[in-house]
């Protein structure tokens, strides 16, 4: 076993165990154990299980993203304060003030990308496993939690004549070209990239406050809007079909999950919040955050009619008539 095989062993074992469990379950329900659709659905069920487990991280991600949007005006003031100052002392002072700002508002920028980072071991484990499936050693001894029969079934199964370990680029460069692999991979890459782009576009167009639409945060979101799909296109031509299925299903889950959050729990001050309040008004319901606004008004001191302070005049005493 090589160095990277040793590093990936815990993750590949976990992924292979979950796939084996779902494959056995679907087979017990009547699906052909040798069918590629059995393994395809097993991969999709793997996605669902992982994303359900990651829901707490997703909630923290949403809170961190909103916190970053809320403090954007203060970050912009901080950037204006140190604009043009490139010396180490100013940079260190700016970093310290920025960290103090994050701490004050309990914001962690790292949390905004934690869910996708948490999925990367699963992604690499599936990628690593599919690249090993065709080796005779693993077809005889099994791989991870998969038995030799399951390894052979997984590697030999196909959908539309395409096996799970087939890859776009080698299939396109083959002589003759394996067009069934090319066409299926293109469709999956388009779905994967399109869902990723629409997810980011939906976030920017509907769930960002006016303050967050300006400054460095907005620029970062615009870069992600175009860079992430490009990364998926470049990587997609080198991913096995099984990995493309996994990541496409993941992106569609993210799209649906984010749509639900934006529709039902939008960022304060965003277009999605205005749309939600319009829907609530049509149903005769009060707008969201109205209770907080009313409470803030109630907490203000009510006028007493008396003029207090340094300029207050002493009350006059009534004089008795002589």
Image (cartoon, rainbow, N blue to C red):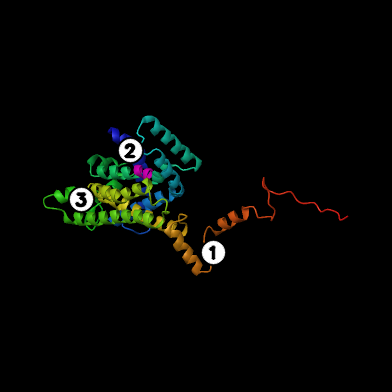
Q: Position of residue 248 (x, y in %)?
A: 31, 53
Quarter of the image where one finds residue 17: top left
Indicate whether residue 221 is drawn in magenta. no
Q: Which residue is mark 2?
A: 8
Which mark identifies residue 286? 1
Label 3 neighbourhood size at 10 Å, few (<14), some (14-19), many (20+)? many
| Residue under the point 17% across and 50% down | 171
Q: Residue 71, percent across and down?
A: 45, 46
Part of the protein shown in magenta: 116-121
Give the main secondary structure of the magenta stretch.
helix
Q: Most extreme residue toward the right, as rendered?
A: 322
Residue at 36% over, 41% down: 11
**Category of crowding for the residue at label 2, using alpha-carbon neighbours closer than 10 angstroms: few (below 14), some (14–19), many (at least 20):** some
In the image, 284 versus 94, the foreground residue is 94
Nearer the camera: disc 1 or disc 2: 1
Q: Earlier in the sequence, mark 2 or mark 3?
A: 2
């Amino acid at each position: 076993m090589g160095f990277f095989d040793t590093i990936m062993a815990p993750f590949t074992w976990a992924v292979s165990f979950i796939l084996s469990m779902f494959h056995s379950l679907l087979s017990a329900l009547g699906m052909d154990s040798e069918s590629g659709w059995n393994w395809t659905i097993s991969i999709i069920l793997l996605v669902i299980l992982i994303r359900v487990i990651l829901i707490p991280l997703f909630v923290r991600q949403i809170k961190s993203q909103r916190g970053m949007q809320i403090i954007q005006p203060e970050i912009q003031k901080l950037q204006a304060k140190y604009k043009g100052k490139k010396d180490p002392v100013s940079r260190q002072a700016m970093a310290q003030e920025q960290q103090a700002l994050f701490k004050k508002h309990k914001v962690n920028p790292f949390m905004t990308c934690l869910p996708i980072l948490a999925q990367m071991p699963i992604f690499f484990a599936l990628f690593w496993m599919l690249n090993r499936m065709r080796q005779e050693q693993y077809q005889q001894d099994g791989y991870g939690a998969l038995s030799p029969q399951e390894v052979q079934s997984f590697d030999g199964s196909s959908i539309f004549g395409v096996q799970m370990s087939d890859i776009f680029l080698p299939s396109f460069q083959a002589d003759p070209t394996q067009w069934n692999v090319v066409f299926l991979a293109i469709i999956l890459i388009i779905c994967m990239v399109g869902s990723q782009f629409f997810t980011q576009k939906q976030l920017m167009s509907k769930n960002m406050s006016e303050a967050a639409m300006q400054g460095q945060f907005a620029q970062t979101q615009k870069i992600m809007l175009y860079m992430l799909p490009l990364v998926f296109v470049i990587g997609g031509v080198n991913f096995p079909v099984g990995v493309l299925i996994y990541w496409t299903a993941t992106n569609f889950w993210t799209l649906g999950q984010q749509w639900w959050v934006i529709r039902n729990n939008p960022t304060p001050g965003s277009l999605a919040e205005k749309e939600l309040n319009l829907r609530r008004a049509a149903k005769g319901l009060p707008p969201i955050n109205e209770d907080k606004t009313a409470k803030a008004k109630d907490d203000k001191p009510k006028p007493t009619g008396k003029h207090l302070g340094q300029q207050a005049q002493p009350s006059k005493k009534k004089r008795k008539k002589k």
